Image: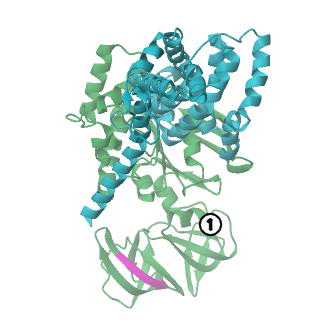
Chain colours: A cyan, B green
Amino acid sequence: MMKRSSKRHYFLLLFAAILVILPLLLLFLWSVSAKWMYPAVFPQVFAGSVYQQMLNEPNFWPAVLNSLLIAFAVTIVTIIIALPAARYFAFQKRLSHRLVEIMIYLPLILPAIAIITSSQVLFLQLRLTGTFLGIILIHTYLCLPYAMQILLESYRNLGEGYSLTAQTLGADSWSIFWQITWPLLRPGITTSAMLVFIVSGSQYLPTFFIGGGKIVTLPLLLLPYANNGRFGLASSYSLVFLGCTMAGVFILKLMIGGIQRGTKH
Amino acid sequence: MGLSINDLQLFYGKNKILQDLTFTVEDGEIVALFGPSGVGKTSLLKMIAGIQPVDKGTIRFTNGFSQASTVLVFQDFWLFPHMTVVENIAFVLKARKFSKAIITEKTNKILEVFDLNGLEKHFPDQLSGGQKQRVALARAVVLEPKLLLLDEPFANLDSQLKNSMREYLRRLQKEYSFSVILVTHDRDEAFQLADRMIILLDGRIQQIGAPQEIYFYPANQKVAETIGESNFIPGMIHDNIFKIGDIEMIVENPNQLQGEVLLFIPYGADAEISETGLPAQVLSNEWSPNGQRTQVKIGETNCTFTNLSQKIIDEEQIFLKFNEKLQVMPR
């Protein structure tokens, strides 16, 4: 019995690994193939020429830096907004959970194109188009639901007991936040920060509209190649994109810190 | 006087949970708030501690008492799981900006007092229930509060531990001389610890008094039933003469009742078996470590007594003479 379940476990793991690795392998093969025609199963000619081409692209390094910069800024702004907001919504007793949920998801429920075009009009008036601030604002708007949802759950799991206890012991709200709430909420904060970073990094439309082409990010370079069937270049950009995201997520994890002793979730 | 609560009310939404709460807590006194779960006792403590807004009424601190010197210890302890025992205790001292030397001195002393030496570096999940309880109390007492609010402090402990923790609290309270408001639904706990008990039922205070007073002279039938050790014997009253069958006895009649009433006799009533008195038929007699438990029939009513001074040997008929005056209640 034991043996069978561990065998099944092993197969499930293998299956999951294949699901993850196969597309990555395909991306890698596309990016290093010079010639890959039907009916060949594997590329016929290997070469590093697309990487050469990618690195020669004048917008490549600015795009990498912009992507990282914007994603980090969006992550920080989003967490700063979401932390107190999630705390309020988690412990308020006036609105039902369902209504709060709908409010949080509203930015994602409304059609993106409507939001983006209308905010473009607004941002034009505010002279925010073509600026980092504009892009960070629109990304933050679209990332907030993800951060809110995770932090809301984290706060609900944590409950009010610890902070009320600290309060009745006479601690001020500053020490309560930094010494009690932050360390206990850390796993939730890390998760939401990583998700926000990934979501921000992969935005195309809002960056395109609000950035107005002046600010280039990796998805902006990647998408045209994928649309035009230049799969080699698209794949190499995708791999760089993946690397950047993983690096960013890793840095965030180091910055915020992971699970601490005694933290239950 | 230390704390005085005047006409306090508590609402859950539109429902009035507590009303007309008026009581005081004196310096160095242990007051037990006794009542069933869900009557708003915890909310009352939160209001006194200042972490829940007061809907209506006043909470006044006098004689050196203040909200800042009032500490609430919750039933679930809420030890900070990411901090060691020492860090848990020192957290508040740090938050209150004590110097390092004083923090070390105070924590060392409190670890000693609470018998926590050797556990300094332990995390809460490595502690037993009793140890957690001690850390939670230590964390509160290290602040040298004037008033300690304890919410069902021993509810999560097994009965043996409960007893030793109660004694412990008594000793501690003598040593540090703080007042305590103890919320409990455990009768024995209230009787053992409290100087005064406040009986909360149906959203209001039914009676305030010393444990013995509450036990022997409950204000009404509800209080008697909540305490849970009552014999009620129906009979007739005229002034202060209670009549059951042909027997007459002099009783307390605080409400000047007339006609059909119930005679209240608590299980623990101090009674002697004598030649004359209230006739009772012995039904059974069981031994327990706390004394014998005797079932008798008085008139048509089955009664229980736990404090009969003589040994009962399956006598058929006895006569009970009570050393304290008994009390009648409306039927």
Q: From the top left corner, tell me how far across and down residue B254 is, in percent.
A: 63, 62
The subunit letter for the residue under badge 1 reads B
**Quadrant for the N terminus of chain A in the image:** bottom left
Magenta segment boundaries in residue numbering: B293-297
Q: From the top left corner, tell me how far across and down residue B318 is, in percent.
A: 40, 85
Q: Is residue B32 above or below residue B160?
A: above
Q: From the top left corner, tell me how far across and down residue A13 is, in percent.
A: 35, 49
Residue A170 seen in the current view: no
Secondary structure mostly seen in magenta is: strand
Dot 1: element: loop
In this view, which residue lies farthest toward the left? B118
Pick the residue in front: A150 or B219.
A150
In the image, A177: left or right of A91?
A: left
Residue at horizontal 64 percent and vertical 12 percent from the top: A133
The answer to whether residue B311 is magenta is no
In the image, A222: left or right of A33?
A: right
Q: From the top left corner, tell me how far across and down residue A246 is, in percent.
A: 42, 26
Pick the residue in front: A248 or B308.
A248
Q: Which residue is mark 1?
A: B253
Q: Is residue A261 above or below residue B21?
A: above
**Quadrant for the C terminus of chain A in the image:** top left
How many marks overall? Answer: 1
Q: Is residue B233 above or below residue A70?
A: below
Q: How many residues crowd around disc 1 within 10 Å: few (fewer than 14), some, or many (20 or more)?
A: many
Residue at horizontal 54 percent and vertical 10 percent from the top: A59
